[in-house]
Image: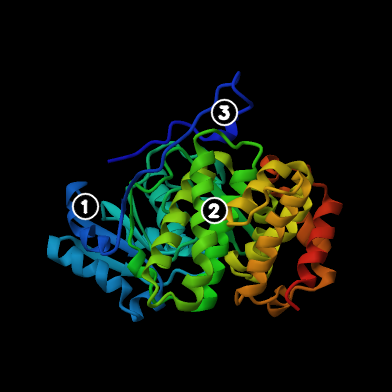
Amino acid sequence: MFRKVAQLPLDYDLFKGKNSIFNWSPAGSVIFGNGSVARTGQEIKRLGGQKVVICTDEGLVKFGVVQKVTDSLEEAGVEYIVFDKCEANPSVETVEAVVELAKNVDMLIGVGGGSSIDPAKAAAILITNGGNIRDYEGCDVFKEPPLPVIAIPTAAGTGAETTPFAVITDVQKQWKMAIGGSYNIASLAICDPELTASLPPMFTAATGMDALTHAIEGYVSRALDPISEPILEQAIKLIAGALRRATFKGEYDKDSRYDMMLGSTLAGMGFTNTILGIAHSMAHPLGAMFHVPHGVGNAICLPVVMQFNMSANPEKTAAIAKLFGKDVSNMDLMEAAQVGVNCVFQLLEDLPIPPLSNWGVKESDIDKLAEEAMKGGDRWTNPRETTIDDFKALYVKCLKLKK
Ligand SMILES: [Fe+2]
């Protein structure tokens, strides 16, 4: 029932050319396709589950998404408890509330984005390891396999359904903890693009830009390996082709929802192995200190960071232009790379992503934000070395965007 990831790349060999050894870890099982959520109950039975806790939020209950899951559970005779208090940037307290409910169940289901799947993963760790979730920050700190988790994403963005991480916010310290671990991966992801059909435009745009950030940061990462490379290329291509359509006509353009979900799932599988870059280092403190939604923070930071990184990896940035469908065949490398960066600036311009000032972020906050961004692990795989002054300058540029 457990799917152990062989080893996370942070403490293992990164790909450094054909004379090096690298490792690549797959996700848990994935069931993908329109209508696949109806299989949830039978899959849980197949895995030996009898009683589950569903982690989700009130909106997904209200709009009938959770009912699609519970209908399937009832049909299969699986008992369930619904916890509908998951919030954006899920907190230590939310994880503890899930643990209280889940003491006598044999599986957890996360229905939603990372805000529902991550607390399910974190609670699954605490149930078998005890202690406080703060004890397990880092990589492979917990020892016992968690309870199995089934991840059912309802947005195409986070990738939490395929990654061995849970990001939990310590509200007191205004700090987002990454809990990574060989066992911290959903045993099964059920990816049903139809569940995303009625997401509103701003939410689709923000979560989709999170997925694009995963794909692009993974693709230009210093840890890119030859297995992740084609996966991330495909992810960028799918998201670049579908995100505007999914945002503005996603209720009836089913193909755009399908491509976004597939792109997001592929991006998750890729960045599990490549890690990310400094757009994520910058988005995390924006979320922890100002409650900027993760996708919004990434959407605004991504093009600014790509411009900063371009000189350190122009080949891949130029390749991004091609994946966006641009003909750069008559350009020199740096010109083509600039087209790649411009494609993402244009995407941000076109999408309904609000500016950082909407969350009260001001220039006077930048020193503290930069200090926090320096603490994140994603900086180590970013193509260009980043100092605290770099982070300050990047935040200044991000604040000026979308005014
Ligand atoms: Fe992300």
| Crowd band around label 3 with a 10 angstrom C-alpha radius: few (<14), some (14–19), many (20+) | few
Q: Secondary structure at mark 1?
A: helix
Q: Earlier in the sequence, mark 3 or mark 1?
A: 3
Q: Quadrant of the C terminus?
A: bottom right
Mark 3 Cβ and ligand 1 under 8 Å apart: no
What residue is shown with label 3? 12
Task: State whether residue 390 appears in this view.
Answer: yes
Q: Secondary structure at mark 2?
A: helix
| Kind of residue indicated by mark 1 | Glu
The image shows residue 354, relative to residue 268, as above or below, that is below
Estimate the spatial distance between the alpha carbons at disc 1 and disc 2, rounded to whole Å: 30 Å
Q: Quadrant of the N terminus?
A: top left
Q: Residue at x 17, y 52 (%)?
A: 45
| Crowd band around label 1 with a 10 angstrom C-alpha radius: few (<14), some (14–19), many (20+) | some
| Kind of residue indicated by mark 3 | Tyr
The front one of 313 and 117 is 313
Which mark lies nearer to you, 3 or 2? Answer: 2
What residue is shown with label 2? 236
Task: Answer with the quarter of the image where residue 72 lies.
Answer: bottom left
| Kind of residue indicated by mark 2 | Ile
Q: Is residue 209 left or right of residue 77?
A: right
Residue 119 circle label: none
Q: Residue at x 70, y 44 (%)?
A: 382
What residue is shown with label 1? 43
